[in-house]
Image: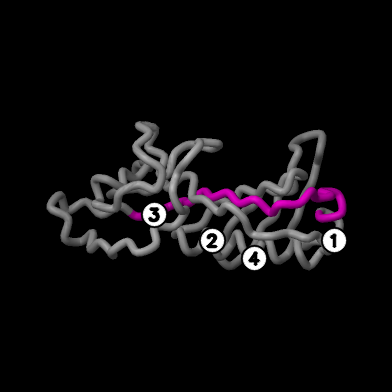
Amino acid sequence: MAAAAVDPMALGLGTSGGASGSGVVGGGVGRAGGGGAVMEGAQPVDLARHPSGIVPVLQNIVSTVNLDCRLDLKQIALQARNAEYNPKRFAAVIMRIRDPKTTALIFASGKMVCTGAKSEEHSKLAARKYARIVQKLGFPATFKDFKIQNIVASCD
């Protein structure tokens, strides 16, 4: 099974941030412009009816969100479950949840990267759950600028 980035134009889905040639849906990290993270109002596509007969299976969705507040990573790591923080190794808290099975990188700037979801909806749900965990720890976190950064799928 070979993994490949999904070409949304080939699937008739369009893109949320313009074509980039990198195989990244919605543009690269930090790219100016770009539309909404989840394609609202998009019509469902019956991939089983695609003329090629190839049906991509989503494997990983990477998304970002801004919590819009500074965070004390040491406090988060000490108080939250399933969180690890080793500043000598990496400057973010690594936190995991079971449902949806995802991992988040939470930075002191309030930026967060969520990876491992199997759909755009699960990615957004997971990001909201991480934001809620941070809120419950006493930080004034808000859910701003959610964006799908990458979609990886495989075809058999």
- Cβ–Cβ under 8 Å for marks 2 and 1: no
Q: Is residue 121 magenta?
A: no
Residue 14 location (% of width, % of height): 30, 49
Disc 3 element: strand
72 relative to 128 in the view: left or right: right
Amino acid type, residue under disc 2 in the picture: Lys
Which of the marked residues, 4 or 3, is nearer the chain's N terminus?
3
Query: Which residue carries the number 2 mark?
Result: 124
136 relative to 111 in the view: left or right: right
Which of the marked residues, 3 or 2, is nearer the chain's N terminus?
3
- The one of 143 and 89 positioned closer to us in this rendering: 143
| 140 vs 63: above or below | below
Residue 7 location (% of width, % of height): 31, 43
Which of the marked residues, 2 or 4, is nearer the chain's N terminus?
2
Magenta-tinted stretch: 57-76
Query: Which residue carries the number 4 mark?
Result: 129
Give the distance between the C-alpha atoms of the residues marked 4 and 3, in whole angstroms: 21 Å
Disc 4 element: helix
Query: Which residue carries the number 3 mark?
Result: 58
Q: Nearer the viewer, mark 2 or mark 1?
A: 2
Q: Residue at x 80, y 60 (%)?
A: 139
Disc 2 element: helix
Query: Which residue carries the number 1 mark?
Result: 79
- The one of 75 and 59 positioned closer to us in this rendering: 75
Q: Quadrant of the N terminus?
A: top left
